[in-house]
Amino acid sequence: MPDTPHDEILRLRAEVARHEDLYRRKHAPEISDYEFDRLRDRLQELEAAHPDLAGPDMGIGDDRIEGFEQRDHAEPMLSLDNTYGREDFGAFVERLRGKLPGADLRFVVEPKVDGVALSLTYERGELVRAVTRGNGFRGDDVTANILLIPEIPRRLAGAPDLLEVRGEVYMRTDEFARLNAEREAAGEPLYANPRNLAAGTVKLLDRAEAARRRLSVVCYGMGACRPAAFSTLADLNARLRAWGFPTSDGFRLADGEEGAWAAIQELDATRRSLPYPTDGAVVKLDRLDLQARSGATSKFPHWAVAFKYPPDQAETVLRAISMQVGRTGVITPVAELEPVLLAGSTVSRATLHNADEIARKDIREGDTVRIQKAGEIIPQVLGVVPERRPADAAPFDFEARLRELGLDAARHGDEAAYRLRTPSRDVKVRRLVHFASKHCLDIDGLGDAVAEQLVDLGLVDAPTDVLSLKPEHWALLDKFKEKSVDNMMAALSAARSRELWRAIHALGIPNVGMQTAKDLARHFRSLDALAQSRLDSYVVKRVGKKGQELKAYDTVISGIGEEVAKSILSYFSDPNHRDWVEAMRKGGLSLEEAAAATATSAAMAGKTFVLTGTLPTLSRDQARDLIEKAGGKVSGSVSKKTDYVVAGEEAGSKLDKARELGVAVIDEAGLRKLLGD
Ligand code: IVH
C-alpha cells in the first residue's frame, strides 16, 4: 500500500533528523549531500502541500556535543541553500533580483570547501575563542584544538574592537592519505573521508591525537564586526590576507548571472587540482549593504548559494560480483570492476547494496556499468549500459551464487539483506572480536588470534560464551600458560563491571554504533528495558493542545529515528539474541546503568573538569569515565565556570589559562582524592 502523505512526512522527518545527526555529530554520514537534499526537498514539498501535517522547523542541524563549553555567536551562523544545474542557479539569481530591484549584482565565486564551519572571535585584535556553528546561534568552544593550526593569526594589527572571522576547517587530501596509510599499516579500519576526519578532529578531546592530525583552515567571511570596517567581501578578503589568514586561492569576482555562471564553469575545470576535495562553488553577493538588504530565511541567506557540480561518473566493465560477509552475517554483493579512474582515484570495487538492487537494475557479470562517486567514499553502480551487454551475459541469480559459494543465507522479515542462517566461523570470530574490543567490553588480550582459537576449539559459538569460560578452558589455548590464564580471568572479571553502553555496543546490533549505544544506555538505563522497547519507545505521534493526535511525530531519543529503532526491534525479536542477554546476566554483567545517586560523590557532583597533559596512570578516556561516573562533567576548554583543571605532564595552554583565571589545578592524586579513592 502506498504511503499516505502523513506516513511519508513522519518517515522523512525521522530520516532527515537521523542523517543530520550522523553528519553533524557522528561525522559518519551514510548518504551523499545530494541524496540528503533530495530527502529534505521532498519533505519541504510535502509539508508545504499539507501545512496541517507539518512539524516544527527542523533548523540547520546541530553539531554540539557533550564535553565542550558552549558559546553564543554575536551574529548567527547560517548555512547555504544548494542549487544543482543552470536553471536552478538562474532561479536563485532571479529571486535575488526580485529582492534588490535595479541593483548591479556583482558576485564572489569561490570553491566550496568541505569541512566544518568555524567562527574565530577577535576582541581588540586578540584571538579569544574559536566556536563551531552549533545550531547557528550557539556552538561548541573548540579553541584548544583550533590553536593547533599554526596558520591562524593570534593577533591582528588595527582590527575592529570585535570581529568574528568565519571560515572552514578542513583536512588536505595529502594529509588524509598520510593518516590513512598509517592506519592501514597498523591494521586499523580506514577513515572514511577527509571531511568526517576533520570534523572528528575538531571535536577530539585527546589533544595529543588532535595534534598528530594536521588541520587546515580557509577564511571567507565574517559575522559581527564592530565598528563596521568593510563594504565588500573583496575588501574583507584583502584585509584577511594582509593579516595572514589563509583565504581561498580560487577567489574570483564575477558580474551578473552570466559572469557568475562562467566563473562556476571555470572553477569546475580546475577544482580537481586543489589540495582539498570540493564538489561545489559558493556564490555570494560582493557588496555587504546589498547582502543586508536581501536578508535571510531562518536557515539560509538570500545573498549566497552553494552550487553543486554533478558527481563524477565513469563507465567500466563489471568483471564479477563477489559476496562480502559482514560481522553480523549480512551479505553484501560487491562489484569487482575493471579498474578505472574516477574523481582522481582508481576504482576497482563498488557496492551493489543487495539482491533487489541487482535485480531492479538487471546488472549482469560482463556488463559495462556506469559508476558514480558523489562525496561518499564507496562508489555506486548507477546502472548498466545496455548496448554494451555481451550476448552471453545471463541474469544474475543471487541465491544460486550463494549456494555455489556454500553460503547458507536467508532473508528475515522485510529486511533487504540476506543473512547467514548459521553464522560462519568467520562471523563468529569477528563478532567475538567486536564483543571484546576496546569500545565494547574491552576484554584485554582477546584479539583476533585468541578469538580464532576459541571458535575453532568450539569453546565459543555466541560471543557471550566467553563470559562462562573457566581456567581449564583457557588452558587449552596455544601458548596459554598459567600466567596468561590468570590474566584472562582478570580481564574477564574487569569486563563484568563495564558500563551498560558497552554491553549494548558489544551486542553488535546493526546500525547501533558507540554513540547510539551511549544514547540508548542513558535513555533506557537497563538492557532489559532496551530489549523490551517498542516502536513507540522511539517515535511517537505528536499530541495537540486539545489532546488530539496531530499528524506529526517526535523522536524520543535525539538522533534515533525509525530505521535504527526497527533495527533494534528486529534484533531483539530473535530468540538467540535474547539468549545472549541472559548469558550476559548469568556471566555477571549488571546490565543496568549505574544509578547516578549511589555513584555520585558530593565532591564531584555537577563539577566541571578540564583534563590537560599526560596523567601518570590514567588515560584521558579513563579519567573522563571516572569523573562522569561520579557525577562530574568533562569539558574541553577552561573558563570561569571550570571547577578543576586536572594537569599532567606537558600540560599546555589550558594550564596557563587556569592560572590566569584562578581555577583550581590538581594532579591525578588530587583527582583520586576527590573521587574518594
Ligand atoms: S560563505 C551564510 N564560502 O559551506 C554562510 N561558505 O554548505 C556563508 N563553506 O555554511 C558561507 N566553503 O560552512 C562560504 N567559500 C565558502 C565556503 C563555505 C565552504 C561552507 C560553510 C557553509 C557551508 C554551506
Image (spheres, grey):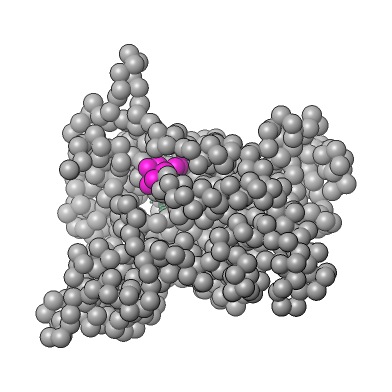
Instruction: Report the front residue among 207 and 499.
Output: 499
In the visual, does 178 lie left or right of 481? left
Q: Quadrant of the N terminus?
A: top left
Decide: is 478 above or below 284: below
Instruction: Report the front residue among 529 and 217.
Output: 529
Decide: is 167 above or below 628: below
Residue 216 in the image, given as x and y percentages of width and height? 54, 62
Taking the magenta stretch, the answer to whether it contains residue 421 is no
User: Is any part of residue 570 visible from this angle?
Assistant: yes
Taking the magenta stretch, the answer to whether it contains residue 561 is yes
Residue 199 in the image, given as x and y percentages of width and height? 52, 55
Q: Quadrant of residue 478?
A: bottom right
Residue situated furthest top in the rendering: 546
Q: Quadrant of the C terminus?
A: top right
Residue 187 in the image, given as x and y percentages of width and height? 59, 74
Q: How many marks?
A: 0
Decide: is 484 above or below 168: below
In the visual, does 202 lie left or right of 573? right
At 79% across and 54% down in the image, what residue appears? 618
In the visual, does 526 lie left or right of 336? right
Give, as a single range, the part of the protein colored magenta.
Answer: 558-566
Q: Quadrant of residue 438?
A: bottom right
Instruction: Report the front residue among 315 and 442.
Output: 442
At 47% across and 66% down in the image, what residue appears? 423
At 75% across and 78% down in the image, what residue appears? 479
Decide: is 386 above or below 237: below
